[in-house]
Image: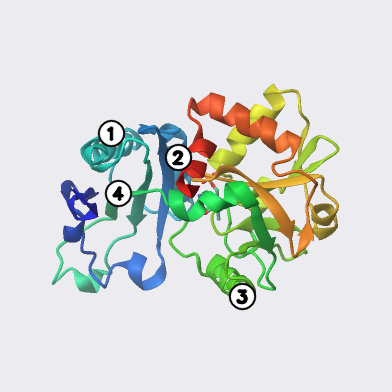
């Protein structure tokens, strides 16, 4: 069995992925007028699905898109998509699991495609475990491009929309200089904001520093790390942090659904800390593994051999 056998939910039906054909007059395709959210499985169990679907609905409300389904229905559909696709996974693989909702078709398109409301897709795809495995051995090389993160005055970065062009433009600039580096964009004031799919944390003298939520997507993994750190008695401060803070940090790491926690080796070529991972990053990684009852670092690292 292969990816060709995967099933997705598409506007009320469970169909093979190749049958998910979105009309070119869909506003998601035309304008990026759509939102999405992505969680993952750990050992085939879906992580914080309710929290991800809640964030999806906050994105929908911000953009005034009516998905035509309740939150509970999306949770149920997501569970069903995962159930139908789990037999395709190897025992030590896991899925990214995504809900996508666009505003739907422009009225002029209805003559051809009689779809009245939103376009709703729920799909999954295996995590890129092999490609990302070296990051847990070597750490991530972060670079900050000249492109700045969209400021909240223009469009709230807390919304997870189908338009990632701002982050993509930043990523292009970085990969032209170092193809394996990851871009973390600064905000318009020169503070660290976030990466294309990740939040950033610094460790200074045992205290965690991370950008304020108004300036970035409130990552579910970011939230998880903050909770775990506070439970462990560590101080967490959400505030403006800049490149001075990064270059002088004892440790730094990125969080995301797929990475969970992954150490940063350098920022703009400046090496961070002496050990990889540093002691606080290691402590939080262990706490994260216990919390999800799954050794995600081992899952990545075993792909190296
Ligand atoms: N920032 C952006 C812009 C993202 O796309 C993501 C990925 N959803 C994150 C941060 C991390 O969020 P999460 O931990 O929920 O994956």
Disc 3 to disc 1, C-alpha distance? 40 Å
N-terminal-most mark, 3 or 1: 1
Q: Nearer the viewer, residue 111 or 234?
A: 234
Neighbour class for label 4 at 10 Å: few (<14), some, many (≥20)?
many
Q: Secondary structure at mark 3?
A: helix
Disc 3 to disc 2, C-alpha distance? 30 Å
Q: Nearer the viewer, mark 3 or mark 2?
A: 3
Q: Which mark is residue 173?
A: 3
How many marks on residues?
A: 4
Neighbour class for label 1 at 10 Å: few (<14), some, many (≥20)?
few
Q: Nearer the viewer, residue 160 or 167?
A: 167
Q: Secondary structure at mark 2?
A: helix
Q: Secondary structure at mark 1?
A: helix
Q: How is the image coloured?
A: rainbow
Q: Which mark is residue 52?
A: 2
Q: Position of residue 176 (x, y in %)?
A: 60, 77
Q: Is residue 250 left or right of residue 27?
A: right
Q: Nearer the viewer, mark 3 or mark 4?
A: 3
Q: Is residue 60 visible?
A: no
| Residue at 76% across, 59% down | 191
Assess mark 1: CB under 8 A from ligand 1?
no
Disc 4 to disc 2, C-alpha distance? 14 Å
N-terminal-most mark, 3 or 4: 4
Q: Which mark is residue 123?
A: 4
């Amino acid at each position: 069995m292969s990816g060709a056998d995967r099933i997705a939910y598409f506007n009320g039906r469970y169909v093979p992925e190749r049958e998910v054909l979105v009309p070119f007059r869909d506003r998601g395709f035309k304008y990026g007028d759509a939102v999405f959210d992505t969680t993952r499985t750990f050992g085939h169990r879906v992580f914080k699905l309710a929290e991800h679907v809640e964030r999806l609905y906050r994105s929908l409300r911000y953009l005034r898109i009516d998905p035509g389904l309740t939150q509970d229905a999306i949770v149920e559909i997501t569970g069903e998509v995962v159930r139908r696709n789990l037999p395709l996974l190897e025992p030590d693989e896991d899925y990214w699991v995504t809900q996508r909702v666009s505003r739907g078709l422009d009225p002029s398109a209805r003559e051809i495609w009689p779809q009245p409301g939103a376009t709703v897709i729920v799909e999954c795809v295996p995590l890129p475990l092999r490609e990302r495995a070296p990051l847990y051995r070597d750490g991530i090389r972060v670079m900050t491009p000249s492109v700045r993160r969209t400021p909240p005055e223009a469009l709230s970065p807390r919304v997870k929309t189908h338009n990632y062009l701002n982050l993509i433009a930043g990523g292009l600039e970085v990969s032209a200089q170092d193809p394996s580096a990851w871009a973390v964009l600064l905000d318009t004031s020169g503070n660290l904001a976030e990466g294309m799919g990740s939040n950033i944390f610094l460790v200074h003298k045992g205290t965690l520093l991370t950008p304020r939520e108004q300036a970035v997507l409130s990552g579910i993994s970011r939230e998880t790390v903050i909770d775990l750190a506070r439970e462990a008695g560590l101080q967490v401060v959400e505030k403006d942090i800049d490149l001075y803070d990064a270059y002088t940090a004892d440790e730094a790491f990125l969080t995301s659904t797929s990475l969970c926690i992954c150490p940063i080796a350098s920022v703009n070529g400046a090496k961070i800390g002496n050990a990889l991972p540093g002691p606080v990053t290691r402590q939080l990684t262990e706490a994260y593994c216990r919390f999800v009852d799954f050794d995600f670092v081992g899952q990545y690292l075993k792909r190296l051999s």
